[in-house]
Amino acid sequence: MIKTVHVHVKRNGAILLMCLTHWISVAQDVTISGTIASQTDGETLLGATILLQGTTYGTTTNEYGYYSLSAPKGDYIIVISYLGFQPYTENISLVQDMTLNIELPEEANSLDEVVLIAGQDRKIDLKSPQTGLNTMTAKEIKQVPVVLGEVDVLKSIQALPGVTSNGEGAVGFNVRGGAVDQNLVLLDEAIIYNTSHVFGFFSVFNADVLKDVNLYKGDIPAQYGGRVSSVLDVRQKDGNSKNIAVTGGVGLISSRLAVEGPLVKDKGSFIIAGRTSYAHLFMGALEDFEDDHLSFYDLNLKTNYKFSDSDKIYFSGYLGRDKMTLDGIIENNYGNVGANLRWNHVFNNKIFSNLSLIYSRYDYQFIFDFVDMDWVSDITNYNLKYDLSYFASDSLTLKFGLGTIAHRLNPGAIEPLSETSAINPRQLDINRALESGVYLSAEHKISEKLTASYGLRLSHFNRFGGQELATYENDLPVVYNPELSIYENGVTSSVRYVERGETIQSYTNLEPRIGLAWQWNDATTIKASYNRNAQYMHLLSNTSNVTPVDVWTPSGEFIKPQLSDQYSLGLFKTFGNRTFSMELEGYYKTVDNRLDYIDGADLIGNNTIENEILNGESRSYGLELLLRKDKGNYTGWLSYTLSKSEQRTLGGEAGGPGINNGQWYNTPYDRTHDISFTSMYQLSDKWSLSINRVFQTGRPVTYPSAQYEYEGRSVAHYEGRNQDRLPVYHRMDIAATFVPNPESTKRWKGEWTFSIYNIYNRRNAASISFGQDQLTGLNEATRLSIFGIVPSISYNFKF
């Protein structure tokens, strides 16, 4: 086995930072540190395990492949392992601080794999106090059949407990009964506000460039802030620092290509990738769709350079775009842009730092040719953050840092397309805000059986002026009209202009969190956690799905930040010589100041959105079970979630009964039962099969309960919100993967994937609408289904 080993003494430094933790009593230990990478391409490995054999001393690498491990002086056997790679062992003599950089060879020839969710391997980590994490490999992701055969990480995580889909074929996801906007989605630390292409059928993440994906749905680490439900942290590959390599794939509606290689061998690398669709070529050939256009593309870039053993710089970028034209009269395009310039610095073998300057933007445009109108909207962020890790000892690691995000939100600008247009130009108020945070967290091995993680985040939010604000009588933007039994706009008493640098409203919140892991024995651990989070940005939408026209708004005078408290308790166990694992976790989560909308709310093109909303609360609770088989030719998992998600909005100062008469009602994301069964079987070196079986309780909806006649028209009457449900959702998908030459030593490696989505052609209801037949006058219900049976084929390659 080829190995790269560098050993040298490193001097102590960063005395000022170390003084912050002078109270820690540490024995006369020595420290071994370094990076773990792939021997094939030089890619650093996140979550690789480093152990001193026969002892309790061990650690894992961070998101940049760096590790630091302290132990008493002596002779040891160090063992380094990572899923999909051959383990490394070496006799070492720890007499002074040393650096050990290791490159691990892969276990076998295969297409690139992505580790989904950081961990020492794909199995559960019994020692970590982290709750609310699941693990998956890209090999499994590629074997899970998906609609139209497009490999998609976000669709795959919906097969895990606590994560549900917004609907048939949709990429947007809900976590533990939370809304879509309560998920913080990051691509190389840049915020992604819309994760979908083609209105939700595909995600913006190209699997060929992904390095790792972390989903935190329970105990969210203190370095993350701004959302109350989950964090999805996606990292791109650094690029091959050894050789030029090409990866790609061809599918029914899209193709992709990625090229990576060294800038300077073993010191710097790059990766650049593109993905595009060609569905519009088929649409143009169809008579009924010749005036329609539907397409998307992605561009990914990342490069890095190592200036010294202590300094490394990264630059990454993303550009994605969708374009749609309907009947030649409506045009829509939308997309994300993200960029990040990062500097890694190692002060010494105990202190690691990362400085990031981040830019992100999401925008959309609608062109209505039939009325000569152009509508544009965008949200732009500028983010500066600094994070440090202090590996105090084998039993204590501290993380601390700070960051600030400048938000600029343009809810909409309207322009006429011609001089004869009847549309008048209009610019909605641009909202500006500054969101800042500072945090300190620790992972502490208190005893051989008890490990704790605890932290505190202090967040601050400033909403700035630069716009006119209305003042309302009795300070009520919404009032209840008892005669009509409806909520109406409050009475405006005056309008004032707030200067751009003046603060409209500010909020400060403490966000504590703690996690505990009690290792009952070598195979069983009990974990518990508490987590508090604040969210200052809100998505204005009265639909359950992310759409291109959704508008974000910051907290302000009448829109308070959402505050969540989540409690989790779980049992984690392995058995059968770690062939099988079980995760059983219960949770209870409450959210204060959750926005709710009055009946008939007008959310688009509205400068006074406070006239349409009331502040409510939500709660969700459930039990999640994950059973896995991780070894052998037959592998897979069974995921089951039993849950409840509800919302309540009282009238409060606005008076009246509130929404739904002030009673708790089901959120659109409530799924009582959610079962997924995913299995993979390796038939031979050439063939593998996979099956995906899904069953979900139908999504809550509101059906009309009666109708009445008014001036010759039939008017539907509605009672409680979300008291009805769509029919039960279920389907089965299958896929087969064929590798023509698994033993080939040639650089070219390829595989064919054949899949059938919804094999028994179940017509699952995406929605049910009600109306009247114009000829007979009879009431009728119309059921909309997105997909029936969908076969697909794709070819993936690497050389």
Image (cartoon, rainbow, N blue to C red):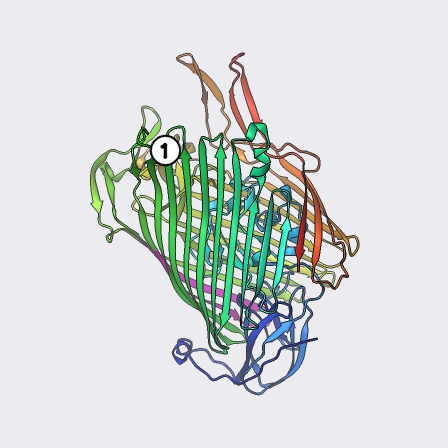
Query: Which segment is the magenta one?
Result: 435-462
- x and y, in percent, of residue 645 in the image: 51, 42
Identity of the residue drawn at 35% across and 26% down: 485
In this picture, residue 92 sits left or right of residue 515 = right
In the image as oriented, which residue stretches furthest toward the right? 684
Q: Main secondary structure of the magenta part?
A: strand
In this view, the residue in front, 403 or 688, is: 688
- x and y, in percent, of residue 793 in the image: 68, 44
Residue 626 at least partly seen: no
Quarter in which the C terminus is drawn: bottom right
Residue 441 is one of the magenta-drawn residues: yes
In this view, the residue in front, 351 or 229, is: 351
Residue 1 at least partly seen: yes
Quarter in which the N terminus is drawn: bottom right
Tell me if residue 254 comes above or below residue 223 in the rendering.
above
Q: Residues within 10 Å of mark 1 (few under 14, many from 20)?
A: many
In this picture, residue 298 sits left or right of residue 631 = left
In this view, the residue in front, 249 or 783, is: 249
Q: Secondary structure at mark 1?
A: strand
In this view, the residue in front, 37 or 366, is: 366
- Residue 764's quadrant in the figure? top right
Tell me if residue 84 comes above or below residue 205 in the rendering.
below
Identity of the residue drawn at 55% across and 36% down: 699
Tell me if residue 91 comes above or below residue 705 in the rendering.
below
- x and y, in percent, of residue 433 in the image: 32, 52
Residue 87 is one of the magenta-drawn residues: no
Residue carrying label 1: 373
- x and y, in percent, of residue 86 in the image: 69, 69
Identity of the residue drawn at 70% across and 59% down: 748
In this picture, residue 143 sits left or right of residue 272 = right
Q: Check disc 1 and give the amino acid type.
A: Met
